[in-house]
Image: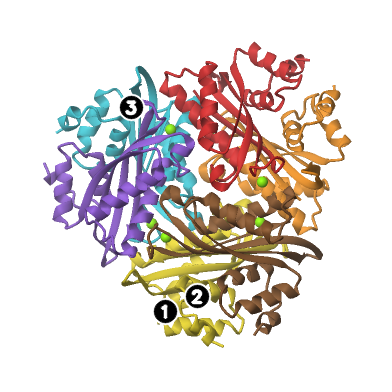
Chain colours: A brown, B yellow, C purple, D cyan, E red, F orange
């Protein structure tokens, strides 16, 4: 199975990050993770449900630190991740970075991947964040899919 | 292969829309398309590269009309799609709906899926748009991944 | 009196929605309501004062449900109304969907109208929301007029 | 007729500005204009259709200057009007100040009113702008109502 | 020393406002203040640290009132200052007027200057606000510089 | 003179960047530049006037490349600078990244500084951009001061 992603090894890091969260908890996730591992990327997947946006930001940041995707002692790395998270949340919230303030809540799964990418001949580290889940009224079933993606050099 | 998505038939329409574009041109796409077809959803996948945002909007709209995802004669359907496209573009552009104005360009693949979804007991039609590709400077290799998603009732 | 609006029966639903709130509590309101009723539209008018935006959203939503403008059990209808409310609030807050966060408060009257509109030959249901009132510092007399309008298919 | 607005002489300047544009070209407009005149406010009403936002801004500005609502030689007055126009356009465009860039066009009627208002005991000049019309695809009938309002001290 | 700013008496009020905050607590501040005084401008400098944006707005407003930069009883003046503050905060927060909601905090020094400026032959009063400091995670050392500027007629 | 900035050698890189542009073409600039040089930072100052935002972005980018502040062949560095520029422009345009689209133009001086900063014990490279000038109507004298600042790790 995993060779499906191996053979398509022109998959960008961002694409793998997105598939990692979208295929989370399915048997296809294994192939994605295998490919990510073989490239030497570090990654993690987590979940957060909240009506306060600060909790979403905190959950993703904490997960990245706890799982050693970034060095929690380095402001540089925290800064890189922070802006990638904000970008991802802009896709989730589309137009205004707000949840409870405009009476909506989210249930999200997120993935964070970090690794070296070769851009125009030089190889540097980048970080990508993908967030997928539901957004909607604070009432079961009154919500729809949402997806966001952020990318930054680190 | 396709049964991978069949078995996970709790995949939401938005998730299938996103996977459709992220797995486009890989052999996994077949499984997604099979699942989409079996549910009776209509869908299309297209591409657009532009430095003018209006061309991106136009390409997605035209593709939806040409491929009969929406009825081009119905303002209601055009309106539903239009707002879904704007939502997707907000994820792509993160913060400001601009491309060439701020000196960046995109190369995008998009998917549009329409179908009946059962929310809280009633079954209605919704439309989702996912846009995946690269955004960056108008110079080959000076761009990174981008992803956006929009969802609306139709 | 009411025939003033009758004779101008090319008034759009959005125009009637806006006049309904702007002429609320004047004798001209009667003519607007008569025209709205004759067209078979459903409508309601309500008030909300708040320093928290979530309360404004909630008040409009609750009013629409309580007065049977939308079916509270249908996510589709809740979704349509929700986005119309957000659009209206964007006019009220001009640039950033915030009240108390940036130290301002509102005292608003809102109208919600729903009905069939004929666009390019087909007749479908749409919903419009108009919000009118004052916005300003949390101090009597230190506020000015504000107006917002949202429109969506339902 | 006009006494309808006279008797409700607690109508704010912003409310009159909004009614002026919403009742434009109906026989009720006369009453609004009479009330505006009796208060010694200056006002004008104009129209603009465009796919370029700069043309909308220019049309409103030019109308205010030509009709002596503001002194075209005073930067202070131009500045006050400019920000009121931007506020009004935010209601029209809801979220992003763009027309053709996101493939939409407008057909608008606007009103500009300037006059002395008594706020908390002191009487100063303010200016308000209301814009009403349609926004939508560049195709006849594929558009819906839109409304925006701006207010500033001058 | 002060003549350094005197000789460059083509320094705009906005430039002096910005230098006032950027040179605060250095010996160069004296020269700026001397020039501001000689022109008959009124000014103040203050500090605020907060994770809630409303506290930042309140601190600047209160400082302007307490130090008689504006007349707290005049809504017109409060309105002019308020919009200048919002503009300055947009520079500080870049893209979204939020602090704690997106898990960040600020430590700011602000300056407010008010005075007569001659624009195109007429001399009127304007107000400018400059905010300088740090923004970042709620953790010492995990923050970077930020700067914002607002300007309005008063 | 220069020792004024030397003695205040706790000036952050962002503060020096801002002073560099605000004191440009005055004799005080020398002190700033001396301090910047002694720290081993690289920097440049340039000018751009435009009604198209893309020209502003291009001018700053080109200046950074031409003056070797960033390596034009490294996408990583171009990316870091690009986001710093966008942040700075948000301060300049306050709320919407638009110039000619909303009928305004700018005349700007910008500074770019790059260097090692010690944050929480580790020393890494960061880049800051400050933009100062005028924004307003396309008519001489009908414009006011504007200022923006961006900061990023590189
Ligand atoms: Mg980027
Ligand atoms: Mg929605
Ligand atoms: Mg619409
Ligand atoms: Mg205001
Ligand atoms: Mg201005
Ligand atoms: Mg930052």
Q: Secondary structure at mark 2?
A: helix
Q: The residue marked by circle 1 belongs to what chain?
A: B
Q: Secondary structure at mark 1?
A: loop
Query: Horizontal and vertical percent for residue C44?
Result: 22, 49
Q: CA distance from mark 2 to mark 1?
A: 10 Å
Vertical placement of C89 versus B79: above or below?
above
Q: Which residue is mark 3?
A: D42
Circle 2/circle 1 CB separation < 8 Å: yes
Any atom of ligand 4 within 8 Å of the CB at mark 3? no
Vertical placement of C28 versus A86: above or below?
above
Q: Which residue is mark 2?
A: B16
Judged from the image, the quadrant occupied by ligand 3 is: bottom left
- Camera-side mark, 2 or 1: 2
Dot 3 and dot 1 within a common chain: no
- Camera-side mark, 3 or 1: 1
Classify residue B128 as left or right of residue D19: right
Dot 3 and dot 2 within a common chain: no
Point out the image quarter for the C terminus of chain C. bottom left
Q: Which residue is mark 1?
A: B41
Q: The residue marked by circle 3 belongs to what chain?
A: D
Circle 3/circle 1 CB separation < 8 Å: no
């Amino acid at each position: 199975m995993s060779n499906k992603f191996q053979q398509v090894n022109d998959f960008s890091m961002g694409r793998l990050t997105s598939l990692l969260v979208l295929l989370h908890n399915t048997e296809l996730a294994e192939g994605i993770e295998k490919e990510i591992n073989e490239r030497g990327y570090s990654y993690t997947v987590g979940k957060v449900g909240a009506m306060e946006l600060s909790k979403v930001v905190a959950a993703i940041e904490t997960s990245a630190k706890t799982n050693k995707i970034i060095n929690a002692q380095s402001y540089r790395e925290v800064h890189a991740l922070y802006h990638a998270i904000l970008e991802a949340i802009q896709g989730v919230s589309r137009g205004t970075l707000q949840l409870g303030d405009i009476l909506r809540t989210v249930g999200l799964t997120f993935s964070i991947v970090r690794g070296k990418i070769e851009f125009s001949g030089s190889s540097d580290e980048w970080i990508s964040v993908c967030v997928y889940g539901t957004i909607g009224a604070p009432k079961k079933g009154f919500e729809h899919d949402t997806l966001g993606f952020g990318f930054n050099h680190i």
